[in-house]
Amino acid sequence: MTRKHDDRRTFLKGVGGAATAVGLAGCAGLGGGSERDYFKLGAVTSLSGELRFGGEVTQRGYDLWADTINEEQGGIEVGGETYEVEIEYADAQSTPSTGADAASQMINDGADAILGPYSSNVTLAVCPIMEQNSMPHISGSAESPQIWQEGFEYSFGTIPTVSIIGNEATSALLNLEPQPESVYVTAVNEPFSVATGEAMRAAAEEAGITVENYEEFPRDTDYTNVVSAAQNADPDLHLHGGHIGSHVDLVNAAEQLGYNPDGFLMHYGVNTGSYRDGAGDQGPYTFGATVWIPGVDRSGGVLFDSPQAYADASQSAYDTAPDYTQAGSTAAGIVFQEAFKELGSAPPLTQDDKDELIGILEEIEVNTFYGDVAFETEGEYYHNNINTQTLLVQLGEDGSPSIVGPEESATAEANYPVPAWDER
Amino acid sequence: MVDIGLFTQIVINGLLLGGIYVTIGVGFSLAFGVLEVVDFAVGEYVMVGAFMGAVLAPILGSEGVFVIPIVLVVFFGVGALIQPLIHHVTTGDRPHPLLMGLVFTFGLATFLRGSVLTIFGPNNQDVPSSLLTGGVTIPGIGTFPVVRTVTAVFGVTGLLVFMYYLYRTRGGMAIRAIAEDRTNARLMGININRYQSIAYGAYAALTGSAGVFIGMTFTANPGMGLQYTAFAFFMVVLAGMGYLPGVILAGIVLGLTQSFTAVYISGNLVLLVLFAIIYVVLLVSPAGILGKGEWAT
């Protein structure tokens, strides 16, 4: 009998001890207060759902930064010690609400900082979570101007807002000879694409070009109607804001109806493999906007010596050529790396460290393969890096992009006006 | 002032868009009318057909048209194999057979979409064709995009062939008898499994082939199926559930409504107008525009 009581007591002690250990471990995880000899970054991005393609691009960008810094330098050097970087991912599932939940999860898991989601919609849902929890956050892909107009204190972005990219690319196109006299502007009705279309329209109006029409429509529209209306207006150029699928549908419908403006400018993603694969024979000669391609003349700097060195590293690691979203995501990691060095605190970061990190990010200037990164500290582009120059690219017959504008950055001459569909 | 040139072009666009919907609606209506299966996988058959076009066309001289016979045969075979499974879950002692069929095909749709996404990734894939490019312009009327015109002709031809088979052959009579009353059809000596497999196989073959045409018209993408599933439902509601001849009229109504709303009202209001039409038809004429389908319940 006594023996039985002893057994029970031993058992209860064991259970109690285990529960205490689990509880302490849990508290440590939640609070992030445990000793840790590496920097822990949370990354919220879409690894499933319709934005999976873009989500994977950002993931490659973040991973390439972390893998390179860990392998080549052993991690980030702070106060004479080197700390590796680990990135923990949470799937936003291509929806803003899930992205917000994923961000909260990353914060609860004790991340030192957050790398941002793919797509502006999800980013707009994640930024308020960062504000509530005073968590430093850099987006390597979001482009909607709305993000920066909100004035989020804890969120930064390496890619210039699309209102700048769309405007500058359009201006570069409008400078080509023969100068166009009229444009037709279309945009898919969602925040990023509308911002793109409006930026294109604004650039045309600023240049004194006639805007025949500005039209928004849902993604799944039938593009023969869009093209018929545009064809009836007979513009010199067609400018379009949307994602890759909408570009493909637009050029397919244009080919089928024989709609031949002097050129199509479309943003986002003309210089991606997805556009080339989808558009097929209709892809060549399309103009697009970007802030980075491997062939761009930038000095290089921290971690990667040049744009081409970065492209080679990406090719080697993932067997794929990087686009500017991937490059911008890697640049986001590099900016955190330099900010951590300047902060000088070993991981895990305290809340005071994180608050101090915001001040450092506001002052930081980092020279990277992607370009010089520095964040605005006031105005409508608050905390957005608008220093990286926009490039006008055009796809060649083999689908590869060449920089054709602005004039000072061009590495090739534009094929303009583009050949008619039946002359290709 | 309405521009006549634009107006006639919008009519052409609407009719040809309707033709694309007809290619999907015919098989879907057949599956519902004959097999009483509300097939949630219809859009995914379109998507898989488009991807077969994207994969096989480059092998066959970059010509998507040459893929059509292969897709017809493969999809007929696969459909004939899937049908017994659907029959199994929609008969016997199971409650709510219609719901069981819906759940089964929903699972099938999810499986197909996930499989294609895993194998090919999320990117768009071109279905090349050198035969069906450009458009034919008739002065004073407008431009007829070749690929869309051929797709519409394919859809209408498919409908006529189905109707001939159903109403002019012994096999068609057997299928109609099964649709009327399975038990009595079995008592009359009709091999139910065989004819149901033929019907579902024919539906799958037509829908998969429609996918190749749609891939040539637009592009192949793993996420494209849902849109066509929705339009297939629109088609059968407007046509009258299970009433094949109504499919053409439903396609024309959907295509023209979409085109005219997009150009003369607003592209943003297209879906709103389409849903409004569907609701009105369901309220006023539940048996479809012509009133000859089964009542929507």
Image: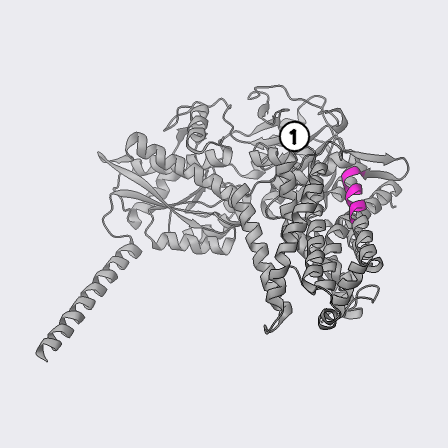
Q: Position of residue A66 (x, y in %)?
A: 36, 37
Give the quadrant of the C terminus of chain A: top right
Q: Judge the density around disc 1: few (<14), some (14-19), many (≥20) Cα neighbours within 10 Å.
A: many
Chain label for disc 1: A
Asked whether residue B240 appears in the rendered view, the answer is: no
Mark 1: which amino acid? Answer: Thr
Q: How is the image coloured?
A: one colour
Q: Main secondary structure of the magenta part?
A: helix
Q: Is residue A326 left or right of residue B186?
A: left
At 29% from the left and 55% from the top, the residue drawn is A29
Residue A299 included in the magenta stretch of the image: no
At 83% from the left and 60% from the top, the residue drawn is B167
Quadrant in the rendering for residue B104? bottom right
Residue B151 included in the magenta stretch of the image: yes
Nearer-the-camera pick, A358 or A281: A281
| Mark 1 lies on residue | A286
Q: Is residue B41 left or right of residue A124?
A: right
Name the element at disc 1: loop
Q: Position of residue A198 (x, y in %)?
A: 64, 41
Q: Is residue A117 left or right of residue A290?
A: left
Nearer-the-camera pick, B234 or A411: B234
**Range of residues picked out in magenta:** B145-155
